[in-house]
Amino acid sequence: MHAQETTFKELVQGEKQYQVPLYQRTYSWQREQLQQLFDDVQELVEEQLEGRAPAAHFLGSVVLAPGRITAGGMQRWLVVDGQQRLTTLMLAFTALRDRHRERGGAEQKADRIHDLVLVNKYRSGDDHYRLLPTQADRDAFTACVESSPKAGGPGNVGAAYRFFLAALTEGEDSGGEAWTDAVETVLSGLLSIVEITAAEGDNVYRIFESINNTGVGLSQSDLLRNYLFMCLPIRGESVYRNRWLPMQELLGPANLELLVWLDLVVAGNSRAKQSEIYRDQKKRLEPLSADEAALEAEIESLSRRAERLMRILEPEREPDPELREVLERLSRWGGQTHYPLALQLLDRVDGGQATPHQAARALAYAESYMVRRLFAGYSTTGSNRVFMEMPKELEKDEDPAEAVRRNLSKNKAGARVWPDDDAVREAIRTRPFYKAGRGNQRFQVLRRLEESYGGSEPVDYAKARLTAEHVLPQNPAQQWFDLLAEEAEDGQGPDELHALLVHTLGNLTLSADNAKLSNHPFRRKQEILDSSALRMNQEIAGRERWGRAEILDRAASLADRAVRLWPGPVAGTIPEDDEWSGWKELRAALLAMPAGTWTTYGDVAALIGTHAVPVGQHLASKAGLHGAYRVLTADGRVSAGFRWPDGQEFGDARTRLEAEGVPFDDAGRARRSHRLTTADLAALLGRETTEETVPSPGTEDEQQSAADRFEAQLRDNQTKETAEGVLGALRFWQQQGGHLAYGRASETSCFPMARFGGTLDTRALWPLAIYPVSGTVEVVFQYLKRRPPFDDEPLRRELMTRLNGIEGIDLAEAKLDLRPSFPVEVFAGHSEEICAVLEWFAHTAALSEARRMLDEDPGTL
């Protein structure tokens, strides 16, 4: 075997082809891996644009074996390992080519990428493509390369293409054409790849097995420890016993790794990567390598920081009550964004350079920054960088609280926008708060709002089992729609008004009685809320009715509390002409839509917190918005006012949608199975709301109570035949060894679970979520794609095919990454057919689990 370091540009140059063998799994990178790669690319782009000479970023290795040489002399290489990286980079270049084409005036750049990176220009058939993925991925990949109407469809390949197209569009909006050119330079020449070439006659499959069955390697902190104690031949044993070992035992392996990374960041290395801790720490410590006393002092300093890190991770360790309270709130908020700032502040407090009160105020501003951005719908992308840069930007001799506030108030595009009071008030009034951020973050906002009422009896949130509750239900009965119809504006239906109001903060509260509240009329909800210990619930119960006026009035009241609880930026730092974040979100949603789907003006409006009319006006006034033709009227028709941008002509919008795979009926209406709802759009943007769609573990009594509620709701809201069909299928599932779990929301959903190890862990699988009141059955591809064996795309497609073979089920292929649904009434006449699909699912899951156990311990079976 031969190994050499190369770049992607050097790897693909010349007439050649890389073919992924059939024994390799399908392309599997998802948003997390794509985002990590693009974050690394952006760092290199920033360095290049700032005039610095960026060092190459090591992407990984690619193992190749020579394949046959074609009749025309073209060399074909088998990709033994590294197909995920190669496919990802090819899709990134495909999106870059299409971004050049969309911008206009850059056709030469687009053609250069197409001819020199993506294809062998003078070859035809399969030989035309520089990369030939496995057969399961081939159609999706070639659709992107050939710019067919189905480019960017469902599945991981289409999702990766859409991810890069969205990332490039957003970056170019703020950085211009120079930014896009810098991205091409980085992708071509600054991603370092180790090319390992097998010799003729090597056993390629054995190489593949060897690479993918390696032992556990040394962590970054392991490497650092080994280096340090290699440099301490005299003092090493004492330092290890008295300093390093106690620190290691205090933190544990994962937090030790976190500490040595934070140590770099607080020291001023705002670009430190957790994957390259050893390299950066070694570079910093090398000048001290001959001075054992200096190295011992460094380890002693690190051990003191270990104690401070534990006060961040476990705030109950912090002795000052005010500082402890803020650390507790940030801990409940989740994530590591605030860690660099918190550690630096604790350094100052312990060193006597700041008071605990100053540190608490500084962290409260950090909390406010994150909460206000959540209200306004800003992306969390880039927030980590803001706080990583903070340590080197704060002056040592000034009040850290004022320094943090001033620093966060420096308005920059995207990552450093700190919404002012007016922006917060408008966002609380209009934006779908329930679809923002993570569930624990929304809960913490509602909790702190409740605490601001100063109730005489404090709530034990750890035991209360409170969850977010919609007062106006998510799936309302007709009585609610009748109420909304009275308040709908001209041209607005009650369903559109419901979509605009239901997820806003003004309609949300906390309750442990979600099952009791359910979808009942407001009078019944009043009785339950009035008995609640929460002041915000008593306030809601005091209303005479609950409609648009009451929701907006409560939103205004909560906004008053919010701007007091979470103080804003220094006055005058938000430019008046800054674009509303909702329009950026609209562009992101359009870019995220898979080919073969459509949505409505109302769905988009509910997503971004506005009305359908301004959405239509914005789409009509902004030329060249990607995917604008996919936004249709509420009944699925192309708007009479739709026009292609000047200079572009793709036929009528219906023809374009049909080419992508959207069926239309004779009346010109797009099929509803291909429509993306507000929830679908939110999921595509990574804003998943899991409270109602992930089963909840509980005690045996709690599960039995939930089972009784589910059956009661099913019988109360569905026909006898439907209810018996559902319950019969669930009994069949249990007879196959499956389990039943139930959701936490007021509509008690049921999940047939294939559960392993006796617990609800990450290996638990469920194909369906059954909703007894709304009468829908969701097929949870969105969750299956992250869980073996259904993270393998062909298996998800097979599940879809089997279900679509049942009369009454029509799942759109374009929703393979989402949660398409079918009516629960299908169980009435086709329960046995559904049982057959469930049996296949259980068998597939069990076989996968058996293989996993055998791999871990060959003596298991």
Image (cartoon, rainbow, N blue to C red):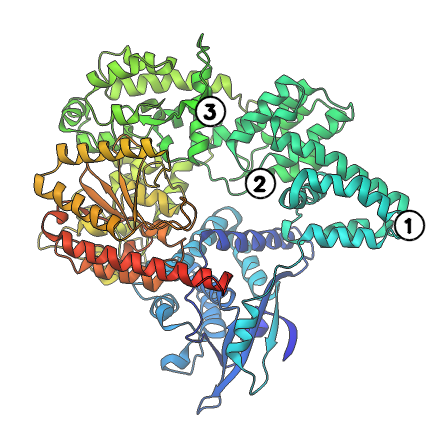
**639 shown above or below 73:** above
Q: How many marks?
A: 3
The answer to whether the residues at label 1 and label 2 have Cβ atoms under 8 Å apart is: no
At numbered mark 2, what does the secondary structure look like: helix, strand or loop?
A: helix
Q: Write down the residue under mark 2.
A: 384
Element type at mark 1: loop
Badge 2 crowding class, 10 Å Cα cut-off, few under 14, some 14 to 19, many 20 or more, is: some
Foreground: disc 3 or disc 2: 3
Percent from the top left, x then y, of residue 653? 22, 55
- At x 64%, y 28%, the residue is 404
CA–CA distance in space, label 3 to label 1: 50 Å
The residue under label 3 is 462
Q: Residue at x 44, y 10 (%)?
A: 457
- Could you tell me residue 655's position as x and y percent? 20, 60
Q: Inspect this view and state whether residue 609 appears.
A: yes
Pick the quarter of the image with the C terminus: bottom left
Give the x, y percent position of residue 400: 68, 25
Residue 188 image-quadrant placement: bottom right
Which residue was labeled with disc 1? 234
Q: Quadrant of the N terminus?
A: bottom right
- SS for tag 3? helix
